[in-house]
Image (spheres, rainbow, N blue to C red):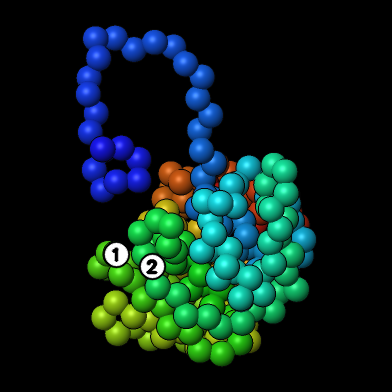
Amino acid sequence: MGQGHLRIVIEGVESLKPACHVVVPDRVEAATLLAAVGLAGGEVMVEGPRAEHMDMLLEKLNTMGVHTVAEEGGLLAVSDGRLHCVDIATLPYPGVATDYKPLLVTMLSVSDGVSIVTENLFSGRFRYIEELRTLGADIRTEGHHAVVRGVARLRGATVRASDIRAGAALVLAGLAATGETTVLGGDHIDRGYEDLAGKLASLGADVRREP
Protein backbone atom coordinates (compact mmCIF):
# COMPACT_ATOMS: atom_id res chain seq x y z
CA MET A 1 0.00 0.00 0.00
CA GLY A 2 1.09 3.59 -0.52
CA GLN A 3 -0.02 7.19 -0.71
CA GLY A 4 -3.80 7.52 -0.69
CA HIS A 5 -4.34 4.46 1.49
CA LEU A 6 -4.84 4.26 5.25
CA ARG A 7 -1.53 2.46 5.65
CA ILE A 8 1.91 2.97 4.10
CA VAL A 9 4.24 -0.03 4.04
CA ILE A 10 7.97 0.73 3.83
CA GLU A 11 10.42 -1.95 2.75
CA GLY A 12 13.96 -1.26 3.89
CA VAL A 13 16.97 -1.20 1.54
CA GLU A 14 20.66 -1.73 2.19
CA SER A 15 21.63 1.88 1.46
CA LEU A 16 20.20 5.24 0.43
CA LYS A 17 21.42 7.54 -2.32
CA PRO A 18 21.62 11.35 -2.57
CA ALA A 19 18.60 13.19 -3.92
CA CYS A 20 17.15 16.68 -4.14
CA HIS A 21 13.91 17.40 -2.29
CA VAL A 22 11.83 20.55 -1.93
CA VAL A 23 10.10 20.79 1.45
CA VAL A 24 6.35 21.31 1.20
CA PRO A 25 5.46 24.88 2.30
CA ASP A 26 3.91 25.21 5.77
CA ARG A 27 0.18 25.58 5.13
CA VAL A 28 -0.55 26.56 8.74
CA GLU A 29 1.92 29.46 8.64
CA ALA A 30 0.30 30.52 5.37
CA ALA A 31 -3.13 30.29 7.02
CA THR A 32 -1.87 32.50 9.85
CA LEU A 33 -0.91 35.25 7.41
CA LEU A 34 -4.21 34.89 5.54
CA ALA A 35 -6.07 35.22 8.85
CA ALA A 36 -4.10 38.39 9.59
CA VAL A 37 -5.29 39.86 6.29
CA GLY A 38 -8.86 38.99 7.20
CA LEU A 39 -8.61 40.65 10.61
CA ALA A 40 -6.74 43.79 9.58
CA GLY A 41 -7.85 44.15 5.97
CA GLY A 42 -5.65 44.87 3.00
CA GLU A 43 -4.08 43.12 0.03
CA VAL A 44 -1.17 40.75 0.61
CA MET A 45 0.75 38.31 -1.55
CA VAL A 46 1.68 35.26 0.52
CA GLU A 47 4.59 33.56 -1.20
CA GLY A 48 4.98 29.81 -1.19
CA PRO A 49 1.71 28.10 -0.18
CA ARG A 50 0.05 25.63 -2.51
CA ALA A 51 -3.63 26.39 -2.91
CA GLU A 52 -4.43 22.76 -3.70
CA HIS A 53 -3.27 21.82 -0.19
CA MET A 54 -5.67 24.34 1.37
CA ASP A 55 -8.87 24.00 -0.66
CA MET A 56 -11.32 23.66 2.23
CA LEU A 57 -9.70 26.46 4.24
CA LEU A 58 -9.74 28.82 1.26
CA GLU A 59 -13.40 28.03 0.70
CA LYS A 60 -14.20 28.97 4.30
CA LEU A 61 -12.09 32.12 4.14
CA ASN A 62 -13.86 33.20 0.96
CA THR A 63 -17.22 32.79 2.71
CA MET A 64 -15.91 34.88 5.60
CA GLY A 65 -14.82 37.69 3.28
CA VAL A 66 -11.16 36.94 2.61
CA HIS A 67 -10.86 36.48 -1.14
CA THR A 68 -7.85 34.55 -2.40
CA VAL A 69 -6.46 34.04 -5.87
CA ALA A 70 -3.86 31.38 -6.64
CA GLU A 71 -0.99 32.92 -8.56
CA GLU A 72 2.36 31.60 -9.63
CA GLY A 73 4.42 31.33 -6.49
CA GLY A 74 1.69 31.89 -3.92
CA LEU A 75 -1.69 33.26 -2.92
CA LEU A 76 -3.02 36.79 -3.29
CA ALA A 77 -5.36 37.62 -0.39
CA VAL A 78 -7.72 40.61 -0.34
CA SER A 79 -10.01 41.68 2.50
CA ASP A 80 -11.75 44.87 3.62
CA GLY A 81 -11.50 43.74 7.25
CA ARG A 82 -15.24 43.00 7.56
CA LEU A 83 -15.79 39.33 8.29
CA HIS A 84 -18.90 37.16 8.07
CA CYS A 85 -19.95 34.21 10.20
CA VAL A 86 -19.55 30.62 9.01
CA ASP A 87 -19.87 27.20 10.65
CA ILE A 88 -16.66 25.15 10.76
CA ALA A 89 -15.89 21.52 11.61
CA THR A 90 -12.39 20.10 11.78
CA LEU A 91 -11.71 16.97 9.76
CA PRO A 92 -8.70 14.94 8.58
CA TYR A 93 -6.97 16.20 5.44
CA PRO A 94 -8.23 17.50 3.05
CA GLY A 95 -10.75 18.93 5.53
CA VAL A 96 -10.23 21.92 7.82
CA ALA A 97 -7.17 21.11 9.92
CA THR A 98 -7.47 21.36 13.70
CA ASP A 99 -4.38 23.63 13.68
CA TYR A 100 -6.37 26.17 11.66
CA LYS A 101 -9.08 26.34 14.29
CA PRO A 102 -7.62 28.90 16.76
CA LEU A 103 -6.97 31.25 13.83
CA LEU A 104 -10.50 30.83 12.51
CA VAL A 105 -12.12 31.20 15.94
CA THR A 106 -10.21 34.46 16.40
CA MET A 107 -11.53 35.72 13.04
CA LEU A 108 -15.07 34.64 13.91
CA SER A 109 -14.86 36.47 17.24
CA VAL A 110 -15.06 39.77 15.33
CA SER A 111 -17.29 38.61 12.47
CA ASP A 112 -20.92 39.52 11.81
CA GLY A 113 -23.31 36.94 13.25
CA VAL A 114 -23.06 33.67 15.16
CA SER A 115 -20.86 30.72 14.18
CA ILE A 116 -20.57 27.16 15.48
CA VAL A 117 -17.12 25.57 15.49
CA THR A 118 -16.90 21.80 15.99
CA GLU A 119 -13.71 19.94 16.95
CA ASN A 120 -13.93 16.38 15.60
CA LEU A 121 -10.32 15.25 16.02
CA PHE A 122 -8.99 16.05 19.49
CA SER A 123 -10.24 16.88 22.97
CA GLY A 124 -9.05 19.84 24.98
CA ARG A 125 -8.36 22.06 21.97
CA PHE A 126 -10.36 25.02 23.30
CA ARG A 127 -7.96 26.15 26.05
CA TYR A 128 -7.17 29.41 24.26
CA ILE A 129 -10.81 30.48 24.28
CA GLU A 130 -10.62 31.77 27.85
CA GLU A 131 -7.79 34.04 26.71
CA LEU A 132 -9.92 35.31 23.82
CA ARG A 133 -12.68 36.03 26.34
CA THR A 134 -10.17 38.12 28.28
CA LEU A 135 -9.82 40.18 25.12
CA GLY A 136 -13.59 40.63 24.96
CA ALA A 137 -14.66 37.76 22.70
CA ASP A 138 -18.15 36.29 23.21
CA ILE A 139 -17.54 32.54 22.97
CA ARG A 140 -19.30 29.68 24.75
CA THR A 141 -18.12 26.07 24.66
CA GLU A 142 -20.28 22.95 24.94
CA GLY A 143 -18.34 19.70 24.72
CA HIS A 144 -16.55 19.69 21.38
CA HIS A 145 -18.52 22.68 20.09
CA ALA A 146 -17.87 26.41 20.44
CA VAL A 147 -20.55 29.02 19.79
CA VAL A 148 -18.93 32.25 18.65
CA ARG A 149 -20.93 35.49 18.67
CA GLY A 150 -19.02 38.15 16.82
CA VAL A 151 -18.32 41.47 18.55
CA ALA A 152 -17.45 44.77 16.92
CA ARG A 153 -13.99 44.97 18.46
CA LEU A 154 -11.73 43.18 20.92
CA ARG A 155 -9.92 45.07 23.66
CA GLY A 156 -6.24 44.87 24.51
CA ALA A 157 -5.14 42.86 27.55
CA THR A 158 -2.40 40.54 28.76
CA VAL A 159 -2.99 36.91 27.75
CA ARG A 160 -0.95 33.72 27.74
CA ALA A 161 -0.21 31.31 24.90
CA SER A 162 -0.80 27.67 25.80
CA ASP A 163 0.62 26.23 22.57
CA ILE A 164 1.95 27.21 19.15
CA ARG A 165 -1.29 27.88 17.28
CA ALA A 166 -3.08 29.39 20.27
CA GLY A 167 -0.17 31.80 20.64
CA ALA A 168 -0.32 32.82 17.00
CA ALA A 169 -4.09 33.27 17.25
CA LEU A 170 -3.71 35.56 20.27
CA VAL A 171 -1.14 37.67 18.41
CA LEU A 172 -3.64 38.04 15.56
CA ALA A 173 -6.38 38.87 18.07
CA GLY A 174 -4.22 41.79 19.14
CA LEU A 175 -4.48 43.12 15.59
CA ALA A 176 -8.26 43.32 16.04
CA ALA A 177 -8.12 44.82 19.54
CA THR A 178 -8.09 48.38 20.79
CA GLY A 179 -5.11 49.39 22.91
CA GLU A 180 -2.11 47.18 23.59
CA THR A 181 -2.12 43.39 23.78
CA THR A 182 0.69 41.41 25.40
CA VAL A 183 0.98 37.68 24.68
CA LEU A 184 3.00 35.81 27.28
CA GLY A 185 4.59 32.46 26.46
CA GLY A 186 6.12 33.63 23.20
CA ASP A 187 8.48 30.64 23.25
CA HIS A 188 5.54 28.51 22.11
CA ILE A 189 5.12 30.72 19.04
CA ASP A 190 8.85 30.57 18.28
CA ARG A 191 8.61 26.78 18.03
CA GLY A 192 6.24 26.99 15.07
CA TYR A 193 7.10 30.26 13.33
CA GLU A 194 10.24 31.98 12.16
CA ASP A 195 9.92 35.62 13.23
CA LEU A 196 6.12 35.89 13.12
CA ALA A 197 6.28 39.37 14.68
CA GLY A 198 8.76 40.52 12.03
CA LYS A 199 6.61 39.24 9.17
CA LEU A 200 3.50 40.95 10.54
CA ALA A 201 5.46 44.15 11.12
CA SER A 202 6.65 44.07 7.50
CA LEU A 203 2.97 44.22 6.51
CA GLY A 204 2.41 47.32 8.64
CA ALA A 205 1.33 45.80 11.97
CA ASP A 206 2.56 47.44 15.17
CA VAL A 207 3.93 44.28 16.76
CA ARG A 208 7.30 43.36 18.23
CA ARG A 209 8.88 40.34 19.89
CA GLU A 210 10.35 41.09 23.30
CA PRO A 211 12.78 38.90 25.28
* Direction from residue 206 to residue 102 in the image, left or right: left
Question: Closer to the camera, 17 or 6?
Answer: 6
Task: Classify 156 as above or below 197.
Answer: below
Q: Which mark is residue 121?
A: 1
State the image coordinates of residue 139 (x, y, percent, origin top left). 43, 84
- Classify mark 2: residues with Cα within 10 Å, few (<14), some (14-19) or many (20+): some
Q: Do the residues labelled 2 and 1 touch (CB within 8 Å)?
A: yes
Residue flagged by tag 1: what amino acid is it?
Leu
Regarding residue 9, the answer to whether it shows in the image is yes
Residue highlighted by disc 2: 90
* Residue at the (29%, 46%) spot, across then down: 5
Question: Closer to the camera, 124 or 185?
Answer: 124
- Label 2 or label 1, whichever comes before in sequence order: 2
Residue flagged by tag 2: what amino acid is it?
Thr
* Residue at the (54%, 41%) spot, across then down: 25
Number of numbered discs:
2
* Residue at the (69%, 79%) spot, across then down: 82
Question: Closer to the camera, 174 or 17?
Answer: 17
